[in-house]
Amino acid sequence: MRTAHQRDEAAPTAVSDDAEVAPTYRIIVSDLVLPWRIGVRRHEEDRRQRVRINLELVVREQADPMADNYQEVTCYEKIIERIRQMAAAGHVKLAETVAHKIASMCLTEPHAEEVTVRVEKLEAVHDAASVGVEIKRFRQNSAGDAPRRRLRITGKQ
């Protein structure tokens, strides 16, 4: 019998030196509430209801953050404006559709790596503060994208 202080021989203990991971940062949009025509019920097609959007976009750092250069970062204002345009575009049946559209849009940003999007209908269920969905999506590597390098964990040395 092993004690709590004994380590499993197969447990990871070190990170190899050849792992290269680009630094990242997160763009966070919290509690963006917009009027949206959303829902599968007939009465939801013609009226807007409040929808809350939360997202976290992981972006590869491209510039020296100390340079304080707006032109070299992913702009959250642009992302929010594109979400507003989606809300104004017309009726959507599913919160899942909204989440997927937002995630796809976010991943068109040149240095975006992954995004988590939460979409909540605030007026759909009388007894609940909100109902909704949360999805997480990753950039698909294409010819222009460098493959993401993963940390390789090695066993006991």
Image (spheres, rainbow, N blue to C red):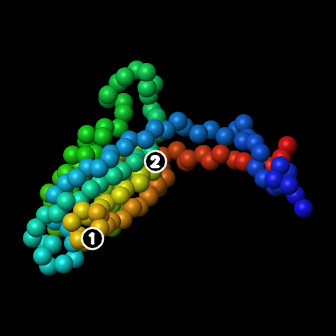
Q: Which residue is labeled 2 in the image?
A: 113
- Quarter occupied by the N terminus: bottom right
- What's the mark number on residue 127? 1
- Residue farthest to the bottom? 42
The spot of residue 92 in percent (x, y) is 21, 68
Q: Residue at x 21, y 46 (%)?
A: 81
Residue 83 is left or right of residue 59, and the answer is left
Mark 1 surroundings: few (<14), some (14-19) or many (≥20) residues within 10 A:
few
Answer yes or no: do the residues labelled 2 and 1 have beta carbons within 8 Å?
no
Q: Is residue 135 visible?
A: yes
Q: Which image quarter: residue 20?
A: top right
Q: Residue at x 44, y 45 (%)?
A: 58
Residue 115 is left or right of residue 53, and the answer is right
Looking at this view, is 33 or 93 the one in front?
Answer: 33
Kind of residue sitting beneath label 1: Asp
The tag earlier along the polypeptide, 2 or 1, is 2
Q: Which image quarter: residue 2?
A: bottom right
